[in-house]
Image (cartoon, rainbow, N blue to C red):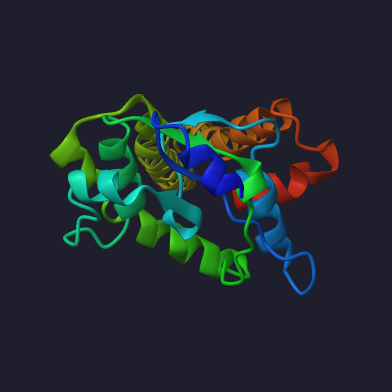
Amino acid sequence: AAVRGALADPSVVAVGSYPAAPHEGSTWVQRTWSHLVQRPGPAREVGWLPSANLAVRRADFEAVGGFDAGLVTCEDSDLCYRLARRGRILYDPATSALHHREPADLGAFFAKEVWHGRDTYRRLLRQGLDRQDLVSLLLPVLNLMAYLLFAAGGLWAASGGSRAPALLGLAGALGLPLLLTLRALAGGRRISWAPRIFLLY
């Protein structure tokens, strides 16, 4: 009913929400990620939604050429960015759904994020930079720089040099997830979730 009601508005080309992990039988990693991606509040326009729970009007789907079969990942954001040129994409919590196959532990979660990142830059080269992409594009680069600085600084300190570069790298490696955790808490997440959110980030 929520989907039909949203698509009854001709200005809306797609509607959906972020799938949630089931309450029963899910791990802390699955529950924490579900907690992070949920957007409490009323229905509102967004830039894109995951295709795991997305309803698109057929005429609009066909008009933009559907999914790009050349992309292994990011095909949902790619589709939504093209759809957004035709109308509004609506996030509506009333269209909620459960996702039973989110990664169960940190190792699997990391592997999924690496996999998801494979086509981020390919899509960027095809469509150009969107403001919403900045965080996902910059964070891996900043994290890599911090870890490399930490490793190189550690080697330098071990050979008698200053420890400052290693400490700066460590501050960057820990500071980025801390900032993301604080941002999540500022968005209304419970403070008791902070350690789990920090570990995930």
Q: Give x and y (percent) for residue 32.
A: 70, 53
Quarter of the view holding residue 156: top left
Q: In the displayed structure, does residue 158 sit left or right of residue 72?
A: right
Q: Which residue lies furthest to the bottom in this view?
A: 25
**Residue 35 seen anywhere in this rendered image of the structure:** yes
Instruction: Determine the residue positioned at 26% across, 63% down.
Output: 72
Q: In the displayed structure, does residue 141 sit left or right of residue 165?
A: left
Q: In the displayed structure, does residue 50 sit left or right of residue 82?
A: right
Quarter of the view holding residue 49: top left
**Looking at the image, which is closer to me, 200 or 70?**
70
Q: Give x and y (percent) for residue 58.
A: 31, 51
Q: Relative to 179, say whether 32 is above or below.
A: below
**Looking at the image, which is closer to me, 180 or 95?**
95
Q: Tell me how many marks there are.
A: 0
Q: Give x and y (percent) for residue 74.
A: 32, 52
Instruction: Determine the residue positioned at 42% across, 55% down.
Output: 51
Q: Which residue lies furthest to the front in this view?
A: 8
Q: Relative to 104, say whether 141 is above or below.
A: above
**Residue 17 seen anywhere in this rendered image of the structure:** no
Q: Give x and y (percent) for residue 4.
A: 53, 47
Instruction: Determine the residue positioned at 54% across, 68% down.
Output: 107
Q: Relative to 120, say whether 181 is above or below.
A: above
Instruction: Determine the residue positioned at 76% across, 46% down.
Output: 195
